[in-house]
Amino acid sequence: MSATAPGAALLTTRGLSVRFGGVLAVNDVSFEVRRGEVFTLIGPNGAGKTTVFNLISRIYTPSAGSIVFDGVELTARPAHAIAALGIARTFQNIELFENATVLQNLLIGHHIHRGTGFWSNLFFTPATRRSELAARERAEEVIDLLDLQALRDSFVAGLPYGKRKVVELARALCAEPRLLLLDEPSSGLNVEETEDMAYWIQDIQGELGITVLMVEHDMSLVSRVSDRVLAMNQGEVLALGTPAEVQAHPGVVEAYLGSVDDVSSLRRKAP
Amino acid sequence: MRYIFKTDYEQDIRIVKHGGQAFWYSALGLVLLVAPWWAGEYWLSQLSFVLVYSIAGLGLMVLAGFTGLASIGHAAFLGVGAYVEAYLSARGWPFPLSMALAAALSAAVGVVVGLPALRVKGIYLAIATLAFGFIVEEVLARWESVTKGNAGMTVAAPQLFGAELGSSEAFYFIALATCVGVTLGVINLMRSATGRAFIAIRDSEVSAQSMGIHLAGYKTLAFAVSAAVVGLAGALYAHKLRFISPDQFGILQSIDLLLLVVVGGVGSIHGAFLGAIFLITMPQLIALGKDWLPPAIGQASGLQAVVYGGVLMAFVLFEPMGLYGRWLKVRTWLQLFPFYRRGMFRRQKAFTKSERLK
């Protein structure tokens, strides 16, 4: 399938922990994402997957531990500096710019490559003009890849859920990232849309050469596109390995379905 | 119906999108250019006021309409601009210089006000700007050595190379040129990365941040730009009225500006102009209406405030996109006749917002 070339680590977390009041949402999580792979976080609700995402994109600050992306310590950087390092993300509950067109959303995704400042923008200098044209060219490539031509000038506020998911993916791609964080790319999508999403994730990895770190619940999608899977439960790492290995891991089965003892305790006792 | 077939990225960033726009905006420009020859003294004065308020409206639009930061203290920037202009004109500064300095100082004050805006949002920001408005009004009243206090100060005519440009025609052209310049500046910002960053902050801060937009930087910038533009309007306002006093820059003026933006259409450049036209013509309409009303109502002192309040409520309830939004609907109705549907502009309900990161 996909190239599983033993690349060097692109993203490494060491002993990552975060505490919200008395809740230890993420506890001592260490993993590394290798260059060029699709790495998936799975786990039951409340396992801390999205929290790990928010730690990487610096929306939250870890209580302990480190996150190193390509030799750069992320915990020392502010949230708005993460995109410029080459990390783009999508959100579980879609955070698009509602009262803007799809194209404008994609252009905002391209913000870090603008190369022009306020004064240049104010007078719309030739530099600004060039940067605007370049941004549109990039946006158009992404529109082509994800089949968004028909929606280019539609307002996001009028789009159905499935399309919004794609627009959000497109916006992240416009940032030309090296690491793409996808937070539940298939949630709320129908079977056909999930199918498309799987192809796109493979394209993003294979053709664009972008490393993907994603959170996903749909196990068929996970086993189809992931090179490695990390299972979490209650903020801790349960298992790490290929999709098949992780799915067979007894701890993972227990986290999802409960242990054999739990089940037997629910059985009606024989009289 | 006009469908623009795009074959070039240039078409996307062009200000004038098609021939129809080119025709109508040239016509408008021509009519405005020759206004001193067709409009009488009275209408020219009204037109000048519309221009001044359009500029102020554009300033507030950048902040409230595009960046999503509501301010109930914007008359303060109008005041700062007006007093700087009055002070410098009295010392014989040429008007382009003094207006530039009025804008710059106003922007500096805007940055100072913008600092708390980085921490507070929504209603709290509104209260903070309200307080700021009162502070500035008070400073203007107390700093008598510069502002002559509550007695107010007279403002000299605009000067250039020793010549006095005291005529109403001269002022009209200065206002027109400033207005065109400011409008082009705002359009340029909004069609480039800076303006899109403003929109991103308005619609979703957490996601703007993840796209690499420095929230604090752009919010401060929005405050500075907004304050500078309103400061320019203030400088023109001072020359127009020829007499300024602190009470002209109080809460009522701020509410007028907010009314202008909401009635015109939040988040559209056209809205600032439509709102300004509304704000200037409304008192005249009310004055006309007074004769038709029974004296008990017609002569009541608070009539204007009641009408303004009613109009504002009506717009918020029935046409949140303001006059410009209404115009878009009328235009679509005309273009599509007879196929217009009532639900065409209805926006879908936003999806699950419960877990949005704040």
Image (cartoon, coloured by chain):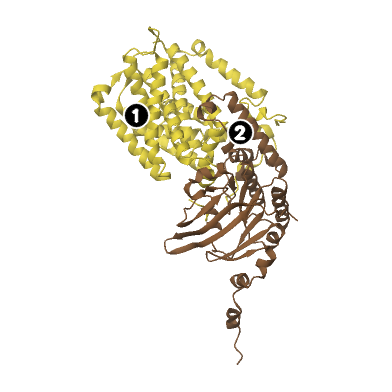
Chain colours: A brown, B yellow
Q: Position of residue A61 (x, y in %)?
A: 47, 53
Identify the mark at residue B249; answer none if there is no mark: 1
In this rendered view, identify the residue nearer to me: B259 or A118.
A118
Residue beneath the point at 38% across and 23% down: B102
Same chain, marks 2 and 1? yes
Q: Is residue A159 left or right of residue B111?
A: right
**Mark 2 and mark 1: span between their CA atoms?**
36 Å
Residue ranking furthest to the right = A1
Q: Quadrant of the image for the N terminus of chain B?
A: top right
Q: Position of residue B91 (x, y in %)?
A: 31, 14
Q: Is residue A83 left or right of residue A152?
A: left
Q: Is residue B298 visible?
A: no
Name the secondary structure under disc 1: helix
For residue B233, above or below residue A58: above
Mark 2 and mark 1 lie on one chain; the one further toward the N terminus is: 1
Q: Position of residue B58 (x, y in %)?
A: 48, 29
User: How packed is label 2: few (under 14 Cα within 10 Å), some, or many (20 or more)?
Assistant: few
In this rendered view, identify the residue nearer to me: B109 or B164.
B109
Which residue in the structure is indicated by mark 2? B330
Residue beneath the point at 34% across and 14% down: B156
Q: Is residue A209 visible?
A: yes
> Mark 2 — on which chain does it sit?
B
Residue beneath the point at 42% across and 61% down: A21
User: How packed is label 1: few (under 14 Cα within 10 Å), some, or many (20 or more)?
Assistant: many
Q: Position of residue A146 (x, y in %)?
A: 71, 45
| Residue A237 position by quadrant | bottom right
